[in-house]
Amino acid sequence: MWVSKLVSSDRQYSHQVHNGGWYSDSSESMENVVQHFPCMGRSQPFVCGSRRRNNLKKWLPLSACVACLLFGMKRIWFSSAIYEEDAKVVEMKYNLEMDFERLLYYVQHPKTLCYTALSLGGNKDAKNRTDGDKIICQDQAPPLRPPCLVYSFGGNDEWSFEEEIVNFGCEVYTFDPSLKMGPHQHKPNIWFYPFGISHFNEDKFIHKEMKTWRMRTLDAIIEFLGHKNKTIDVLKMDIEGDEWNVIEDILEKGLFKKINHLCVEVHMHSGDWTRKLSVLRKLEDDGQMRFFSSRKNLVTKPRSVPGFRNRTEQLFYELAWYRDS
C-alpha cells in the first residue's frame, strides 16, 4: 500500500512542478515518504541511530557466540598441538628407556655356558675387589697352546694379565698410546708398542694428554707385526669407550674368523643404546663369537644413565666371548 502512495506522491510532485506549485504540495508528499522511510531527510540522526543500535543489539549475542567459537577452536587446536608434542616426547622417552633396558638385559645375561672358566691377571684393592683380570673359557673354546698369540690393548701400565697369560707359552703384544715409553720388550715374550687401536689409521692429537697418539686399525697392526698368516688366540681391549667403533671395524673386515678369544671392558656411559646392542648381536651372529661371561666392574662407581632422571647404574662391564669352532 505504501508503494502506491509513493507513486501517487511522485505523480503529484510532477504535476506541481509543471504548474509552479512545488511548495504547496511538496510537504504533504514528503510526509508520506517519511512515514515509510523515517530516516530519510531527518536533520536529527538520533532516531535512525537508535534503530541501528537496536539492530546491533540483536546481532551482539550471535557475534559473541561466533567469537567464542573461533577462540575455542583456536584453543582446541593449540591444546591438540601441545598434546601431540607431549605425546612425542613421552614416546621418545619410552623408546629410550626400552632401548637401555634391552641392552642392559643382553649384557647381563650371556647365552652360552662355560663350565671351565679361567681368570687371568688382576689386582685386589683395599676393599678386596679385583680389577684388571680377564676370563678365558677352556672347555668349549679353542685351547691356549704354544705358540699362542695375544694382543692386549690398553692397561694403563698394569701388566698382571700379560705376565700371567705368557705362562701358557704365548707371545704377548701389548699396546697403549697413553704411556710415555717407546717400543720395548717388557719381559721375555712380552713386547710393548705405543699404538692405540681404532677404526682409522691416523696420528691424532689428544688435547687432554697434550700429545699425539698413533692410532691404527687391527688389520694395520697385524700387517705391521707380520702376523697376517697367524691366528690371534686372545684379543683383549680396555680402550675407554672406543671398543664399539673397533668391534664394528673388525666385523666389517671379517677378522673375527682369525680371533679365538675376545675379552673387552665395555663402556655404556655415552648413550646410543640401539647401536651398542646391534654391535653385540652382530658379534654373535656375524662374527660367530659366543658370549659366555659378564661381570660388573666393581671398582668403578655407578653413573647417571644418559637421558634418564634420577637413575644410576653400573655402566662398565667385563665381557668375554670365544669363537665357535
Image (spheres, rainbow, N blue to C red):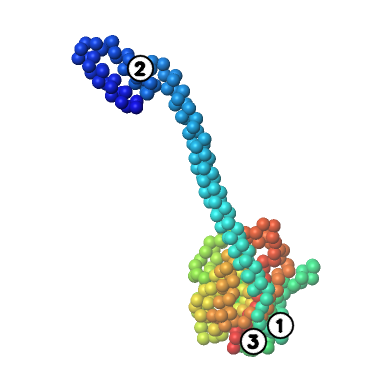
- Decide: marks 1, 3 in contact (CB < 8 A)? no
Left or right: where does residue 142 sit relative to residue 62? right
Q: Which residue is drawn at 70% across and 61% down?
A: 312
Q: Name the residue under label 1.
A: 118
Give me the C-alpha separation between circle 2 and circle 1.
122 Å
Residue 231's place in the image compared with 85, above or below, is: below
Question: Which one is in front in this view, the residue at disc 2 or the one at disc 1?
Answer: 2
Which corner quadrant holds the N terminus? top left
| Residue 305 pos. (x, y %) | 66, 61
Q: Mark 3 points at which residue?
A: 141
User: Disc 1 to disc 3, how far (Cα)?
Assistant: 12 Å
Image position, residue 42 (x, y; %): 38, 17
**Tag 3: Cα neighbours inside 10 Å, few (<14), some, or many (≥20)?**
some
Q: Earlier in the sequence, mark 3 or mark 2?
A: 2
Q: Distance between the residues labelled 3 and 2?
A: 120 Å
Looking at numbered disc 3 in the image, what kind of residue is underneath it? Ala
The residue nearer to you, when weighing 33 against 238, is 33
Q: Indicate the secondary structure of the residue bearing disc 3.
A: loop
Tell me which corner region of the image, top left, top right, bottom left or bottom right, holds residue 266.
Answer: bottom right
The tag on residue 40 is none
Kindly identify which residue carries mark 2: 31
Residue 91 appears in which quarter of the rendering? Answer: bottom right
- The disc, 2 or 1, on the residue closer to the chain's N-terminal end is 2
Q: Which residue is drawn at 65% across and 88% down?
A: 140
Dot placed on the residue nearer the N-terminal end, 1 or 3: 1
